[in-house]
Image: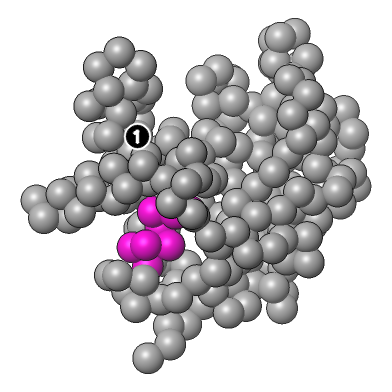
Amino acid sequence: MPVSPEQLHRIVQSETEHFCDAQQALEQTRESDGRTFDDPRLHARMANCGIASALIQHNLRVHHNIATARLFGRPPTAPYFPSGNEFGHVILRSDNTLIDPTYGQIFSFVGIHPLSPVKGFSYPDNLALTVDTTDPEASLESLVDALTGAAQLEISPYLQSRAPLRHKGRRTLQSVIYDIYNPGYYAPYELETLHPSFDRVQALIHVSDQLREQ
């Protein structure tokens, strides 16, 4: 039986929380280079779109009987990172709904990074973003507002140097966000066994299953 957009939104939020817990548990097993946080939810604010989408796609299918397509895109107006790397993003799609469990990383465009707290800033309450492609404004305008507000906050010169959209204004932010969530810029992106992240995703699924059994 199909789920409503509202039900899907709630399920995605729950599964994104679960991803954060599973990622935290997996990092705790990596003695030398594991990255853990006091707040595991920060894992969804990092550039973890590839592994997060893979786990959530798996859990939506296995535990909720919800099929999704995994997509990769390079939206044309998205800025390059200070490192020179082009922005590429992985999301999921279920019928008319786009699912982005790591949209928090987009705040880096205006100088907000999870490892560098900024006075007066808090991430939106929704850990994951769901976008109805028939009515994207309902989700995207509030995100644009949040980014516009975050761009006005005082940040360090270092963060300013890594914030390509900080001084671009609301109209530019709006254009970039609507491009990032334009499904026309995405193509299917299945996780192949030879992909560098494959073994890590399999380990994450294993940890996820263990957490569900507790």
- At a point 45% along the width and 75% down the height, the residue shown is 67
SS majority, magenta: helix
Image quadrant in which the N terminus is located: bottom left
The spot of residue 77 in percent (x, y) is: 86, 45
On the question of residue 45 being in view, the answer is: no
Circle 1 sits in a helix, a strand or a loop, which is it?
helix
Q: Which range is magenta?
A: 51-60
In magenta segment, residue 55 = yes
93 and 40: which is toward the camera: 93
- At a point 80% along the width and 31% down the height, the residue shown is 80
Please indicate whether residue 97 sits to the left or right of residue 157 in the image: left
On the question of residue 48 being in view, the answer is: yes
- The outermost residue toward the left is 214
Q: Name the residue under label 1.
A: 40
| Residue type at the position of mark 1 | Pro
- At a point 46% along the width and 41% down the height, the residue shown is 197
The quarter holding residue 91 reads bottom right
